[in-house]
């Protein structure tokens, strides 16, 4: 049962990380252009740092889905090690981006 559910959950996680990358890059674009008064862009000192961590967390999360997909396809112990390592790194950067 776990193998049957891993694929759809991996795809859902990929879609959510793509949304994070899209929103973070949009906010960084407005922040760089000096549009601080835009409703979607905050305006304190930690905003740029938060956006950089969110963007890097999204990119690392998207990249970590490749070993996850390869593990779902192979379902062996050696592929599990690669998938687990990259997912833990992606989770750590995502937790750092939470603030």
Image: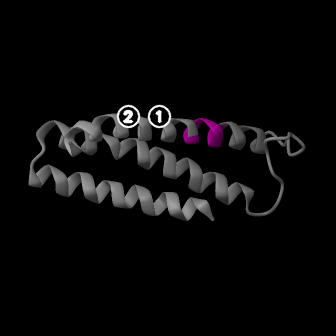
**Callout 2: SS:** helix
Range of residues picked out in magenta? 20-25
* x 43%, y 36%: residue: 12
Please check the rendered image and state whether residue 24 is part of the magenta-colored stretch, yes or no.
yes
Picture quadrant of residue 2 = top left
Which image quadrant: the N terminus? top left
Left or right? Give the position of 83 relative to 8. left
Residue located beneath label 1 in the image: 15
> Could you tell me which residue is drawn at 47 percent across and 34 percent down?
15
Q: How crowded is mark 2: few (under 14 residues within 10 Å), some or many (20 or more)?
A: few
Q: Going 42% across and 49% down the picture, which residue do you hit?
A: 60
Position of residue 68 measured from the top left corner of the image (x, y, whole percent): 27, 44
Quarter of the image for residue 74 reads: top left
Q: Nearer the viewer, residue 82 or 75?
A: 75
In the rendering, at what x and y percent does residue 57 appear? 50, 52
> In the rendered image of this protein, does residue 9 appear above or below residue 82?
above
Residue 33 on image: x %, y %? 80, 39
- C-beta proximity under 8 Å, tags 2 and 1: yes
Residue 9 % position (x, y): 36, 40
Quadrant including the C terminus: bottom right
Image height check: is 97 above or below 4? below
Query: Which label was assigned to residue 11?
Result: 2
């Amino acid at each position: 049962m776990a193998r049957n559910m891993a694929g759809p959950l991996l795809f859902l996680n990929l879609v959510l990380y793509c949304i994070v990358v899209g929103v973070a890059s949009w906010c960084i674009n407005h922040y760089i252009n000096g549009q601080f008064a835009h409703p979607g862009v905050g305006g304190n000192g930690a905003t740029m740092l938060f956006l950089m961590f969110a963007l890097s967390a999204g990119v690392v999360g998207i990249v970590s889905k490749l070993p996850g997909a390869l593990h779902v396809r192979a379902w062996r112990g050696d592929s599990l090690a690669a998938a687990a390592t990259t997912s833990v790194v992606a989770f750590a950067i995502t937790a750092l981006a939470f603030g």
